[in-house]
Amino acid sequence: MLIDLKKYFSGENVEQKIDYCIDLSDVEIDGAKPFVSPVHIVGDIRAFASSAELNVEVSYAFSMPCNRCLAETRKELSHSISHVLVNKLNDEEDFDDYIVVEGETLDLDELVYSDIVLLTPPKYVCSEDCKGLCPTCGKNLNEGDCACEKQHTDPRLEALRQLLN
C-alpha cells in the first residue's frame, strides 16, 4: 500500500485509517515459509508537526519448526508498530527516533515487513520446557525417554574419568 505523505508534511491536519491485509506466504525465513495467514494491518496515520505519525497493529499466524525438537509450531502473533515519518532531519542526533521517507510516498508494505522481520524471534521453540532431540538416536524427548546411554563422556576426557574411578 502506497501512502502519499505530501499533505502530512505540508502541515495540514489530516488523518487516514488503515485496514488491509498483505500476503507474505512466499517469504522464506531459514528455509521455511512461516506466514500461514495474511498479515492484517489496522491503525491510522495522522499529521503531526509537519511529519506523520503511524500507529498500526499487525496480526498474523506464524508457523516454524521448533529449533529443539523440529516439531512444527504455530503461533498467532500480534505487534504494535509506531513510527514518526519525516521528509528530512534537522539534527542528525535524532536519526534513531524517526524514519526519513525519500520523496513523499511511503511503501507501507515494505515498512511493515521490515518491522515484522525485526520482531521475529531468532529461535523458535514449541514451548519453553522443550527437551529437544536425543543427540544419539534423534528421538523427540518430549514424547518420552529413549533407550540410549544417559552418561556420555567426551572421548578427550576419558583418561580423567579413569583416574576418578
Image (spheres, rainbow, N blue to C red):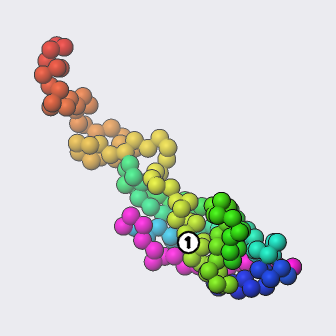
Please provide the residue range marked out in magenta. 13-31
Relative to 63, residue 163 above or below? above
Is residue 79 something one can see in this rendering?
A: no
Image check: 128 left or right of 71? right
Q: Is residue 16 magenta?
A: yes
Q: Position of residue 61 (x, y in %)?
A: 56, 66
Q: Residue at x 69, y 77 (%)?
A: 87
Neighbour tally class for label 1: few under 14, some 14-19, many 20 plus, Cα within 10 Å: some
Q: Residue at x 38, y 48 (%)?
A: 68
Rendered image quadrant of residue 99: bottom right
- Could you say which is closer to the camera, residue 63 or residue 87? 87
- Could you say which is closer to the camera, residue 82 or residue 155? 82
Rendered image quadrant of residue 70: bottom left
Image check: 117 left or right of 31? right
Q: Is residue 25 magenta?
A: yes
Q: Position of residue 96 (x, y in %)?
A: 63, 61
Q: Position of residue 80 (x, y in %)?
A: 68, 62
Q: Residue at x 56, y 60 (%)?
A: 119
Residue annotated with mark 1: 113
